[in-house]
Amino acid sequence: MRTKATAHFLGVKVLLALFIVLMEIIFINSLASAGMEFVFSSVAVTIALLLQLRFAVRPAAASPADMVVFIFNWLFLDLAPKVQLMSMPQRLINTSTVAVDRVALTNLMCALFMLAFTLFYGFLSGRAEARRVDSPPASAPRPFTAGAVGLALFVCVCVVAIAAPKAYASIDNAVAPSPASLIVKRCLLFLPSATLLILLHETVRSGRKLLFSRVCVLLLLLLLVLITENPYTEKRNALGPLYIALLLVAFPGFFANWSRRMLLLVGGMVVIFPAITIFTHNHQQALGDVTLTQVLDRLMDHYFSINYDSWANIYTAVEIAGAHGVQWGHQLLGSLLFFVPSSVWSGKPLATGIFLANYLTKNYSMWFTNLSAPLIAGDISTLVSSASCSMRAWQRLP
């Protein structure tokens, strides 16, 4: 059985690798005239991605963290920029213009980040695997008392009954969110989701007989989650992690298989999440009015939306560093000392996304400041250290 599972695992990896190589061949054939440095840097990204797939995605990992990093690197730093450059070779998705030397340097930085992550992950996950072999098996979680469950359910119902109508009213009236409303939306209205995840995990891991009362509590919490977390109230980047987490917690046996977890994550990030933007970006859209053509058009256009601006923003960071010099930790320092108010620290750096957007607005035609800020774009000098710190945070993951 273990041999069959290993063969299936390797088969999925081979299919992914073949698709990545095929996209690289199509990309080179399309833009080979741009120059050898352009081609070689793209090949470097592909090689780094294949090495990450081979050495930094573990079939025995209980957490899908390594899989998520691979999918992010694949979609945002490899596939999306290739599709964008083949369709718009003179202009990036964030309105910046294309220069071959900066494209090459951006690709090399992305490849270096992937290699650094792979090296640190391989080293630290090997140590974690050795500790897990020596450690005793985990015991079942302590059961929650009926009183604790009832109190948590009561609090969740009260929060939804009081806060949800106001949240829906602000969406209907297109009111700009205030700090207070963001706290209500991001914290208070997330209580049912957090409670459901915790209680569901305890229920599944306990191994006890499932009582009718517990089923009713879980279903009621799920109903509250559907009320507070849906395409009308949230964007795809908030809905995706929540519902994927619910599936992984609810069906740990089914998704213990690496291939099924990969299929869930790839299917969600490549197909489902882009498709539901039909509703998250248009609150008047009715489910019955959605056509297959509309869904396919949304999927095709999705890679050209500002959602896939990560690579382009790294490119802009390279451009800024070339024009004004490397920041040497200046942006990173602002992130680490985020709690220091700007009124006290007059020279506090802007958030990296805003910093990049201001540059693009001044020099190109960017029209808003809500841009993504990948780790690599935060500060070029922290490229390898950011991968190291990320892996240190995951060192204790199973």
Image: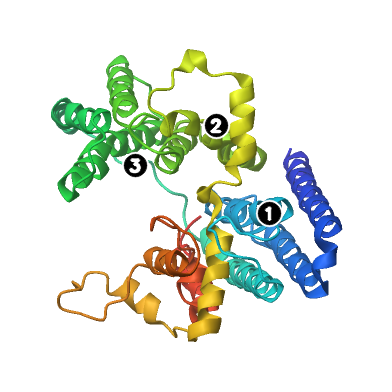
Residue 275 — which label? 2
The kind of residue on which mark 2 rests is: Ala
CB-based contact (under 8 Å), mark 2 and mark 1: no
Instruction: Give whichever of 228, 395 is nearer the camera.
Output: 228
Q: Position of residue 388 (x, y in %)?
A: 51, 73
| Depicted 343 relative to depicted 80: above or below | below
Residue at position x 32%, y 29% in the image: 225
SS label for mark 3: loop
Q: Residues within 10 Å of mark 2 (few under 14, many from 20)?
A: many
Nearer-N-terminus badge (2/3): 3
In this rendering, does residue 127 appear at all? Answer: no
- Circle 3 residue: 141
Nearer-N-terminus badge (2/1): 1
* Left or right side of 334 for 363: right
Residue at position x 27%, y 17% in the image: 213
Q: Position of residue 354 (x, y in %)?
A: 37, 64
The kind of residue on which mark 1 rests is: Met
| Depicted 384 relative to depicted 265: above or below | below
The kind of residue on which mark 3 rests is: Pro
Nearer-N-terminus badge (3/1): 1
Q: Position of residue 355 (x, y in %)?
A: 39, 69
| Depicted 223 relative to depicted 123: above or below | above
Measured Cα–Cα span from mark 3 to mark 1:
53 Å
SS label for mark 1: loop
Instruction: Give whichever of 371, 393 is nearer the camera.
Output: 371
Instruction: Give whichever of 296, 56 is nearer the camera.
Output: 296
Q: Residues within 10 Å of mark 3 (few under 14, many from 20)?
A: few
Q: Residues within 10 Å of mark 1 (few under 14, many from 20)?
A: some
Number of the front mark, 2 or 3: 2
Quarter that holds the N terminus: top right
Number of the front mark, 3 or 1: 1
- Circle 1 residue: 88
